[in-house]
Image: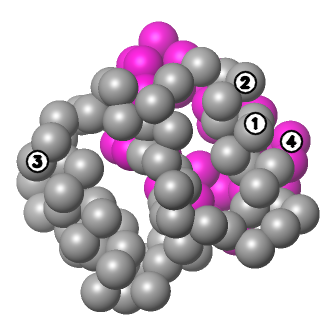
Amino acid sequence: MCIALIGGMDRLERHYRDEAAKMGFDLRVFSTWKTNISAKLKSVDAMVIFTNKVSHQVRQAAVKTARSKDIPLIMNHSCGLCSLKECLGCLQFAKPIIS
C-alpha cells in the first residue's frame, strides 16, 4: 500500500520511511512544496497530513485531491514518529477516517 505523508520534519524523513517499511507500507514523503503536487498524489492509496508542518496551500491541494479521487485521508497536528505510527496503525487495522 502506497501512503503519501504531507508535512513533517526533513530530519525525520529517513525514520518515517523506515517505520512505514516495518509496517509494510511504501511511504512517499512531501515535506516541502513540490511542483504539481496534486498529480503526484493521485496515485497513492492513502494520505497522512501533519498539519503543523505544512503550508495552507499544500494542505488545501492535498485535501482537494483526496476528495476528488476518494483517497482516505488522516490529518494530525503533531509530526513526530509516534504520530506517524498511530496514523499508519489506523490504516493497517481499521477503515481510514477523515479527521
Instruction: Classify 33 as above or below 1.
Output: above
The answer to whether mark 2 and mark 1 are in CB contact below 8 A is yes
Left or right of 20? Residue 33 is left
Highlighted magenta segment, given as a residue range: 1-30
Q: CA distance from mark 2 to mark 1?
A: 5 Å
Q: Which residue is mark 4?
A: 22
Q: Of the residues shown, which amino acid type is indicated by label 1?
A: Lys
Q: Going 36% across and 36% down the picture, which residue do you hit?
A: 51
Give coordinates of residue 11: x percent, y percent: 47, 12
Q: Amino acid at mark 2?
A: Cys
**Residue at which label 2 appears:** 82
**Splitting the image into 4 quarters, where does residue 82 fall?**
top right
- Tell me, yes or no, if residue 28 can be seen here: no
Q: Which mark is residue 85?
A: 1
Looking at the image, is 32 positioned above or below residue 1?
above
Q: CA distance from mark 3 to mark 2?
A: 25 Å
Q: Residue at x 30, y 64 (%)?
A: 63
Indicate which disc, 1 or 4, sits on the residue closer to the N terminus: 4
| Amino acid bearing label 4 | Lys
- The local secondary structure at tag 1 comes to helix
Question: Closer to the camera: disc 2 or disc 4?
Answer: 2
Spatial separation of the CA atoms under disc 2 and disc 4: 14 Å
Query: Horizontal placement of 11 versus 90: left or right?
Result: left
Mark 1–mark 4 Cα distance, whole angstroms, equals 10 Å
Label 2 element class: helix
